[in-house]
Image: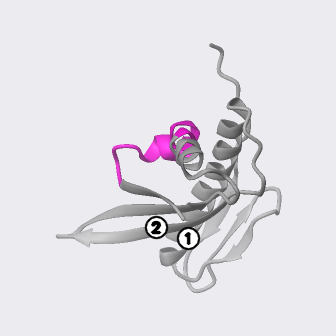
Amino acid sequence: MTEKLLFTGKTHNKGGRDGFTRSSDGELDLRLSQPHPAAERLFGAAWSACFIGAIELAAAQRKIKLPVEPEIDTEIDLNADGGSYFLRARLNVSLQGIDRDVAEELIHAAHEICPYSKATRGNIDVALNLI
């Protein structure tokens, strides 16, 4: 298999009271006065956006028509334990109009496809919840 670069996301961040993040294409332009909780929110937004694409791909591979667009409420927890920091995540997925067993199958398939899920696998606790 030959590797093919699909996209490179580029951002510029500045810390402090006047902190911000901007993407090179201007599509993302946010004020970030504190690094946290902004980092967890941005990570949750990026992961859930990717996960929606993975659900859509999993459905297409199985020739399942999604009656409505998937929705995800992502929660990223920043935790501390004895001076060490770690993350915990919950992806609360809504797949309206699909049989519950099929929806569960798509969510677990998406977790295998999504690059963010792959990057975090074995590194943080992740709960996948069908809501």
Which of 114/68 is in front?
68
Compared to residue 15, the image places residue 49 above or below, namely: above
Where residue 35 appears, as percent x and y from the top left, is: 50, 74
Where is residue 71 drawn, in percent x and y? 67, 62
Q: Viewed as shown, does residue 27 lie left or right of 81?
A: right
Relative depth, front residue between 65 and 79: 65
Q: Which residue sits at x=47%, y=76%?
A: 36
**In front of the other: 72 or 120:** 72
Which of 101 and 76 lies nearest the eye of the viewer?
101
**Which tag, 1 or 2, sits closer to the chain's start?**
1
Question: Relative to 30, does residue 4 appear above or below in the rendering?
Answer: above
In the image, which disc is placed on residue 27?
none
Q: Main secondary structure of the magenta part?
A: helix
Give the answer, above or below, for where 43 lies relative to 54: below
Image position, residue 70 (x, y; %): 69, 57
Mark 2: which amino acid?
A: Ile
Quarter of the rendering containing residue 26: bottom right
Mark 2 sits on what residue? 76
Q: Helix, strand, or loop for circle 1?
A: helix
Q: Quadrant of the C terminus?
A: bottom right
Q: Which residues lie in the magenta part?
A: 109-124
Q: Using a 10 Å C-alpha cutoff, classify the residue at mark 2 as few (fewer than 14 neighbours), some (14 to 19) or many (20 or more).
A: some
Q: Are marks 1 and 2 in contact (CB under 8 Å)?
A: yes
Quadrant the N terminus occupies: top right
- Type of amino acid at the residue the image marks with label 1: Arg
Q: Which mark is residue 41?
A: 1
- Give the residue at x 57% y 60%: 93
Q: In the shown orientation, is residue 85 left or right of residue 113? A: left
